[in-house]
Amino acid sequence: MIVCEGLGKSYKHGGRRKQVLANINFSVGPGDRLGLLGRNGAGKSTLIRLLGGVEMPSEGRVRRDMTMSWPLALDGGFQGSLTGYDNARFIARIYGREFADIRAFIEDFTELGRQLSNPMKTYSSGMRARLAFGLSLAIEFDCYLIDEVIAVGDANFQRKCQFELFERRADRAIIIASHSTEQVRSVCKSALVLDGGRGVLYDDVEAAIAAYEQL
Amino acid sequence: MSALSEGWRIQTRVIGALMIRELNTRFGRDNIGFLWICAEPMLFAGLVGLVWSFIRGPEENGIGIVAFIGSGYIPLTFFRSAVGRSNKVVEANSGLMYHRQIKMLDFVFTRVFIEMIGAMMAYVFFAGALGLVGLFPIPANPGILIAGFLLYALFTLSVCLILAPLSELSEVIEKLLPVTTYIMIPFSGTFQLNSWLSPSVRAVELWSPPANAMEIMRLGLFGDKVHPYYDLSSTLAISAVLMMIGLIMSRRMRRDIVVA
């Protein structure tokens, strides 16, 4: 289970504190798929970072009883000056995996070919997303944190995600922040709508999407 | 207890991975790669030693001047580069904070450790090369020499642990660093032995951890030619206090880090 208890985050800004999230509560178990909906700046990415332990909450806490991926987002997690292979080696090392085991999977999943030997700063956002997903799937987590990033991939990549993540790993928990109501509708079983720092949890995705579209 | 050993296992794994990554990004894989890390301290030590031997002659108080300067300057370059590399270390690595198991302290440990290994290799090469032509003595007591070096490294680490969070909080620190490390030279033991000083100056030096550690290194290197004055307990105590302050600052700062 991943449990959020009274989670809040505020940032100091010019001597003033800005409350981005306040008193967020929910839990996610194996096989659950939670969508995070909200307008730009509503705190979706911030919540993903708190869940992933990238930033620390100002109030409340996150309890993690299962393994959780790092936030799969447009940036972060990689070093641009290193090649795709070197980044993969680094990630394999810090997660205690053998690079040899992971290599074949990412070569097949990313279809990046010789690009994997080039520095990651030369990658497009879609290519970065492929590698990030490939690595996190090869490492195998119980819960995947996804911040918008599927949307940057092409149709082929989306098909692969659909198969590898949503079908083959249907027992895993997924928390996904997205602007695409279409994606949330097809992937998620429940959704949290963020507005003004507060979160409202809907067990019915259609109701959540209706509330989001009212914002 | 098992949580502690699990944490230890993860952090050693992370630091190992960070070191390999750091060496790759800094020196690449081609050529002599990370041997370059030795080049700078050796050049410094060699050239400064040469200048001093022109000014002061080949020996001072029965100690070869090139060996004396080299044995002081290599640890000093270690301190300076470790301090320089701790500046804004979190900002430089913040993309990696996406991986929860990588802690702020790992960045500091990694960089100090790499600089330390570089300085040790530079010391060995320098001593070996000059030793062949009789300008560097065989260490009288290698154990004491290494103990002194480790003490010097402990102090360096404790300073870096404070500097890493401090440099994130204030832009001024970055500007003050070069002048501070320069001002520090008289208190680093690099160019003197405590027995050469007047008792009142020596009393001040005995409060300086790097001067004490340097004195111990010189004792290990030159043996009987040195009449050592050092204060081990103040060195350990000051380093421990600095380290505690650094750890507390890092912990408090972690809460407010905004990862780009």
Image (cartoon, rainbow, N blue to C red):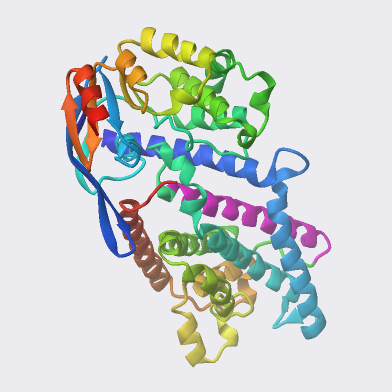
Question: Observer-nearest residue: A38 or B76?
Answer: A38
Q: Position of residue B206 (x, y in %)?
A: 46, 79
Q: Is residue B99 left or right of residue B150?
A: left
Any magenta on residue B111? Answer: yes
The kind of secondary structure the magenta stretch mainly shows is: helix
Q: Position of residue A95 (x, y in %)?
A: 44, 29
Question: Observer-nearest residue: A108 or B158?
Answer: A108
Quadrant (top left/top right/bottom left/bottom right) for the N terminus of chain B = top left
Question: What's the residue at 54%, 26% (across, down)?
Answer: A126
Question: What's the residue at 55%, 82% (across, down)?
Answer: B194
Q: Is residue A136 left or right of residue B33?
A: left
Q: Is residue A97 visible?
A: no
Q: How many marks?
A: 0
Question: What's the residue at 50%, 73% (across, down)?
Answer: B212
Q: Is residue B62 visible?
A: yes
Question: Observer-nearest residue: A125 or A195?
Answer: A195
* Image: A123 above or below B183: above
Question: Observer-nearest residue: A203 or B190?
Answer: A203
Instruction: Answer with the quarter of the image where residue B182 lies.
Output: bottom right
Q: Position of residue B112 (x, y in %)?
A: 53, 54
Q: Is residue A31 left or right of residue A156?
A: left
Instruction: Answer with the quarter of the image where residue A68 lies.
Output: top left
Q: Position of residue A207 (x, y in %)?
A: 19, 20
Instruction: Answer with the quarter of the image where residue A201 lies.
Output: top left
Any magenta on residue B127? Answer: yes
The magenta segment: B106-134
Question: What's the residue at 84%, 63% (across, down)?
Answer: B133
